[in-house]
């Protein structure tokens, strides 16, 4: 899916580049390109995913023990756990 950034009348070159960088980071293009740069075995991908989930679960447990943590932070972590 292409990313098209059009310059407005009062935008400088710097502003257009800034908008392009923001759009590419929002679309997560750079990280996908880095991940696909070298081949990873499927077993290695599963291992990485499992360790990340384990780390997130541990972080959620530790944050739940704390008293001054907002519900939004816990919600974000649970969303990440549910998504993967």
Image (cartoon, rainbow, N blue to C red):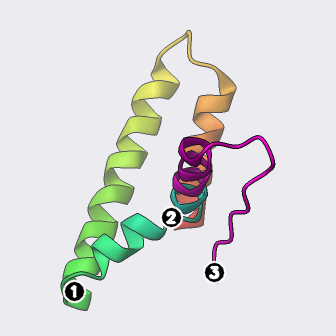
The residue stretch that appears in magenta = 1-22
Say which residue appears at 50% left-offset and 64% top-offset: 28
Q: Is residue 38 magenta?
A: no
Q: Earlier in the sequence, mark 2 or mark 1?
A: 2
Dot in front, 3 or 1: 3
Gap in angstroms between the C-alphas marked 3 and 1: 31 Å
Look at the picture and state if 9 lies above or below 2.
above
Gap in angstroms between the C-alphas marked 3 and 2: 13 Å
Using a 10 Å C-alpha cutoff, classify the residue at mark 3 as few (fewer than 14 neighbours), some (14 to 19) or many (20 or more).
Answer: few
Say which residue appears at 64% left-offset and 72% top-offset: 3
Furthest residue toward top: 68
* Quarter-of-image position of residue 83: bottom right
In the visual, does 32 lie left or right of 71? Answer: left
Image coords of residue 20 (percent x, y): 57, 57
Mark sitting on residue 43: 1
Q: Earlier in the sequence, mark 3 or mark 2?
A: 3
Using a 10 Å C-alpha cutoff, classify the residue at mark 2 as few (fewer than 14 neighbours), some (14 to 19) or many (20 or more).
Answer: few
Residue receiving disc 2 = 28
Residue receiving disc 3 = 2
């Amino acid at each position: 899916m292409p990313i098209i950034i059009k310059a407005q009348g009062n935008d400088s070159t710097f502003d257009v580049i800034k908008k392009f960088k923001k759009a590419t980071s929002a679309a997560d293009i750079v990280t996908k390109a880095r991940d696909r740069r070298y081949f990873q075995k499927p077993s290695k991908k599963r291992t990485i995913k499992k360790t990340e989930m384990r780390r997130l679960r541990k972080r959620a447990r530790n944050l739940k023990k704390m008293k001054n943590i907002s519900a939004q932070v816990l919600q974000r972590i649970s969303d990440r756990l549910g998504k993967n």
